[in-house]
Image (tube, rainbow, N blue to C red):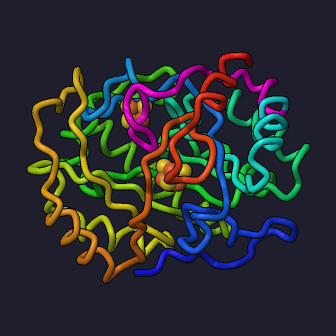
Amino acid sequence: TTCDAPASLGPKVDLSRHPCFNKKSHHQHARVHLPVAPRCNLQCNFCNRKFDCMNESRPGVTSAVLPPDQAVPYLEEIRAKHENLTVVGIAGPGDPFANPVETMATLVAVRKRYSDMILCLASNGLGIGPHIDNLAALEVSHVTITLNAVDPEIGARIYAWIRDGRRPMRGLDAAKLLLDRQLDAIQRLKAHGIIVKINSIIMPGINDHHFLDIARTVSDLGADLMNCMSFIPVKGAAFEDLPAPANLDVIRTRLQCEKHLPQMTHCARCRADAVGLIHESIDNEDMTRLNRF
Ligand code: SF4
Ligand code: SF4
């Protein structure tokens, strides 16, 4: 299994220093998630929005929302403590593009201050489209799209509703539009040379038979890496009674999908306010710092 990403993209940014996309670097380089995106533009049946985004987080865990104009002062403090910080990401606690003003303002401010920082995003893909050119201009180099189905019939079982602008949609129409947006986003991100990881959550009886189709489809569009994640039942979510997949099934799924694209296996499902090395738990000082901003 390899999950090493191409070594360079922009002139200043050394992509081998992203601990999540480059297994060799995950003991050396630290990352921080800036929790500037509280709202979400859809409802996954596996998520309880009272808590947090399963895109990249465990439930219940951003200690605060960071105002975009505090991103740089906050990062200054983080950098003073974590000298090995190479990646600044936005991964919720909702979706970055349900909060596009906050997300883009944060990225602009961070890029202006730190020309060599790797910028990274995780999104459900619904609202990212109009921002892709600007993301490329800001040299955002890594984007994760969470995509759980490439068949709208299956998608309709996973998403309770989506909101596109002011328009709420449900059922098959919602799943179709979401899928169109996700596939289009992958293609356009790749046209800009951005590294694209796909997160797919294995939900027994819902989409677990469907992973080869997902892997084949996203690989054909140029996605670089796939992260097959276990579904974790969350209290209060529509799927709270669905069982988690067996470990063996997760391994089998990854082996099958590996025929189509490299699998990421060291993801730690970090919090939306994660700080530090990816397998290091957040310490008290970092935890309380956020509440001062
Ligand atoms: Fe929850 Fe993330 Fe799904 Fe939004 S995209 S409903 S925050 S898991
Ligand atoms: Fe990296 Fe996964 Fe953590 Fe995101 S959730 S920072 S991809 S290890």
User: Is residue 40 visible in this depiction of the protein?
Assistant: yes
In this picture, is 165 found above or below 117? Answer: above
Q: Is residue 105 visible?
A: no
Q: Nearer the viewer, residue 285 or 185?
A: 285
Tell me which residue sits at (44%, 57%) in the image: 267
The residue lying at 28 percent from left, 35 percent from top is 159
Q: Quadrant of ligand 1?
A: top left
Q: Quadrant of the N terminus?
A: bottom left
Q: Give the percent coordinates (x, y) of residue 31.
A: 65, 50
Of residues 85 and 40, the one nearer the viewer is: 85
Q: Quadrant of the C terminus?
A: top right
* Residue 32 location (% of width, % of height): 65, 44
Q: Is residue 97 left or right of residue 239?
A: right
Task: Name the side, left or right, on which 46 lies relative to 262.
Answer: left
Of residue 233 and residue 168, the one placed in the foreground of this image is: 233
Span shown in magenta: 52-72
Magenta region's main secondary structure? Answer: loop
Q: Does the magenta segment cover residue 87?
A: no
x then y, percent, for residue 3: 49, 75
The quadrant in which residue 108 appears is: top right
Residue at 47 percent across and 30 percent down: it is 164
Q: Residue furthest front?
A: 284
Which of the two residues, 142 or 25, is positioned nearer the viewer here? 25
Task: Note whether 218 is above or below 280 in the view shown.
Answer: below
Residue at the (66%, 54%) spot, across then down: 30
Residue 34 place in picture, x, y as percent: 65, 35
Q: Is residue 231 above or below residue 161?
A: below
> Quadrant location of residue 15?
bottom right
